[in-house]
Image: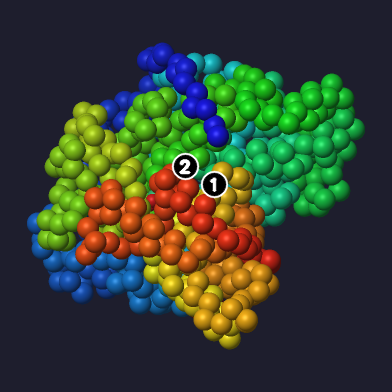
Amino acid sequence: MFMAVESTLPTPVRTPASDKDAKALQFIEEMTKNVDSVQERVLREILGRNAETEYLKRFSLNGATDRETFKSRIPVVTYEDIQPEIQRIANGDKSPIFSVHPISEFLTSSGTSAGERKLMPTIHEELDRRQLLYSLLMPVMNLYVPGLDKGKGLYFLFVKAETKTPGGLLARPVLTSYYNSDHFKTRPYDPFNVYTSPNEAILCVDSFQSMYAQMLCGLIMRDEVRRVGAVFASGLLRAIHFLQNNWKQLAHDIATGTLNPKITDAPVRECMRKILKPNPELAQLVTIECYEENWECIIKRIWPRTKYLDVIVTGAMAQYIPTLEYYSGGLPMACTMYASSECYFGLNLNPMCKPSEVTYTIMPNMAYFEFLPHGSSTSCLVDLADVEVGKEYELILTIYAGLGRYRVGDILRVTGFHNAAPQFLFIRRKNVLLSIESDKTDEAELQNAIENASLLLKEFNTSVVEYTSYADTKQIPGHYVIYWELLVKDSAIAPTNDVLNRCCLQMEESLNSVYRQSRVADNSIGPLEIRVVENGTFEELMDYAISRGASINQYKVPRCVSFTPIMELLNSRVVSKHFSPDLPHWTPERRR
Ligand code: AMP
């Protein structure tokens, strides 16, 4: 549906834009030249300060801070392995379990365990480390795109709901923590990093009001906007979709200088009062551009001085590249950093490269990194400085907040080196079947959801004989599509449309809390759809796979599909389509 547009990439300027930039670039050079010694120091610091923690004592580290002892005594763990300790911290145990520094809060990862977001303990000083990584991004970008100090960045940034654990610690996503920190709220003025969105709009927890105010500011300051972005591609597309749905009201506000009464948040109203002035000319321009049926190039049309999009389009976000190209008219897409709740890992030193060529350079000062060659046993971990070009690895982390040898679940491939620092292509997150934005649904969760939904079919003497799934991101918001082949044993009492709609909702109720939050609070995932296919469709699918060389003995139904011929086959056999009629249950509180 979308035409790929050739990007016109700016040529690197290659001189630091300021003394501050020169210092930041110098820091990157030092870190990347001395990867191994920095890593040795980081491990020494982490183990030295945490020597008296329950966790390190349990493995008889006895104060050792060298790699060899560490590697021989500390096991590689998953979240589930350390969940009992995490639960104790959540319940209020303040003893030094992982870290001698007090746990300041929990960061809620988009990765889940038993349906709930994982809780990552963090310490206050981690904010400085995150800030440090952020401070390196613009100096690199300024090498490639000159003149960013002459304008502003239109970034759609959001906070999410916060909760408290039984022991009273805050639990919230890492970006919500960062945007609420003084590091962000009282950041010093930097001409290269001026946002159109006021802090009040970013910090408003109501996602509609926050987006509305941020979009309104972006429109009002249209002439100043030099870059447009969001954290992930899905977020930027959500903003475009929001504009599609709300441009009339936004244009009205701009024309009259009055704010939509749906914006009730007092700090947002107060700051918009200062920014919003009647501007009928701008309102007319917005109306003319948005009134058009064709939204191709809308970003360039509304913000004509935009030089690039700042969004992550690697990993699961790659599915959005064609849509973003369509809306932006082929603007370059910069993926600047690679990070997680546990740790901010590194940055892209060539941010204007094509999305398929994006590599991230892990900064060795952020944590101690080890790499498990893909498919090998956990006894063969390799150090950051020793990874080999062309090989794939799973990332293993040891962080200052104390998580030791923790499996993040990301698979990375080494493509080359910057100085002595390896550069990694993000390959995929392990065990993720379906993803629309930050949700990550694995095969077991999907299976469980199918089983729960099919209970509703029992009284109709019907069962699900086969299924597969597809993340449909052609429309915004994207949604999960589940293909079902049913065995209806008594056609006189076949399940009705209403029952199958309820099956959709039942599946949603069974999916993890990140999925349900995206559905309910963020509106970033649309209603789940079940497509019932003709009997025999999955056998045809198998015939097709075998005709392409799959072994009959080893054939397994793919539980997620995206390959066009398979999609065409499935879609040509659809007999009925059903959608979730309601929102699933979600509150910020954890269920367990
Ligand atoms: P969370 O723990 O919710 O912050 O999610 C972190 C995960 O998001 C990482 O472990 C990656 O799987 C994914 N991620 C973060 N940054 C990137 C990136 N630049 N490209 C691809 N995936 C990313």
Residue 172 percent location from the top left of the image: 53, 60
Secondary structure of the residue carrying numbered label 2: helix
Circle 1 residue: 473
Q: Amino acid at mark 1?
A: Thr
Q: Which residue is mark 2?
A: 319
Q: How many marks?
A: 2
Residue 366: percent from the left, percent from the top? Answer: 32, 46
Question: Could you tell me the amino acid type at mark 2?
Answer: Gln
Q: Is residue 529 visible?
A: yes
Cα separation, mark 2 vs mark 1, equals: 7 Å
Visible in this render: residue 432? no
Q: Is residue 437 above or below residue 156?
A: below
Tell me what residue is drawn at x 57 percent, y 30 percent. Answer: 326
Specify whether 402 is left or right of 445: left
Q: Residues within 10 Å of mark 2 (few under 14, many from 20)?
A: some
Residue 484: x %, y % from top left: 50, 66
Residue nearest the observer in this picture, 83 or 32: 83
Q: Check if mark 2's residue and mark 1's residue have beta carbons within 8 Å.
A: yes
Coordinates of residue 173 in the picture (x, y in percent): 51, 57
Q: Say which of 175 and 579 sits in front.
A: 579
Residue occupying image coordinates x 86% and y 48%: 261
